[in-house]
Structure formats: structure tokens, C-alpha cells
Amino acid sequence: MADNIVEQAAAWRTAGRRVALATVVSTWGSSPRPVGSQMAVDDRGSMAGSVSGGCIESAVAHEAAKTMEDGEPRLLSFGITNEMAWEVGLACGGQVQVYVEAVE
């Protein structure tokens, strides 16, 4: 599946769009997607792939837009404590780090 995401990112670049690629680089505890999961975002707001199964995609897309603008890579951290997870009905807490970089 990762190849399809990279291929989609390449197709968007070939079409003249700016593109950022987000990759899960580490997880701790409960995480919906494993390390290596990817999501591509273009400057029109299109997305391919997933880094979280939906729960942080909008935040990652927002940061990807910044990366497309300034070319600066970003390391994003998202997490929830065990206590907060219990309150919202999840079995355990977790953390995920996502690296976002512009595709040239």
C-alpha cells in the first residue's frame, strides 16, 4: 500500500502540485497505524493513505500545508494519557510521532 501512496504523491508532483509526505516514525502504547504508515497531501487538500485511521489526519494535513509553503520538515507528536483514554472509552493511551516532509 505504501507504494501506491508514493506513486500518488509522484503523480501529483508530475501534475505540478506541491506535495508533502507524512510518515509514522514511532508509536508507543495504542496506535491505530504502525510505524511506516504514510499519507500524502497535495496543495489542493487531496489526501492518500493514513497515519492514524482518521483521528489526527486533519492536524497532519494542516502541518503538511505549512511544510509545502516553507519547505521545512516537521516532527509531530500526538498522544493521550492512559487516564484520558479511559475517560473517552479507549482501552489504553498511546502516542504517535509523524514526520512530515515536502516532496520535491
Image: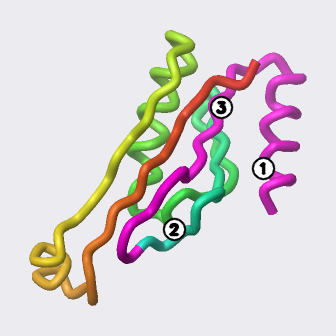
Please state which of residues 81 and 47 is positioned toward the viewer in this rendering. Answer: 81
- What is the three-letter code of the residue carrying label 3? Asp
Indicate which disc residue 53 carries.
2
The kind of secondary structure element at disc 2 is loop
Res 42 label: 3
Circle 1 packing at 10 Å, graded few (<14), some (14-19), many (20+), is many
Relative to the observer, which residue lies in front, 96 or 64?
Answer: 96
- Of mark 2 and mark 1, the one earlier in the sequence is 1
Mark 3 Cα within 10 Å, few/some/many (few <14, many 20+)?
many
Label 1 sits on a secondary structure element that is helix
**Residue type beneath disc 2:** Gly
Mark 2 to mark 1 CA distance (whole Å): 15 Å
Residue range of the region highlighted in magenta in the rendering:
1-30
Q: How many marks?
A: 3
Of marks 1 and 3, which one's residue comes earlier in the chain? 1
Q: Position of residue 100 (x, y in %)?
A: 54, 34
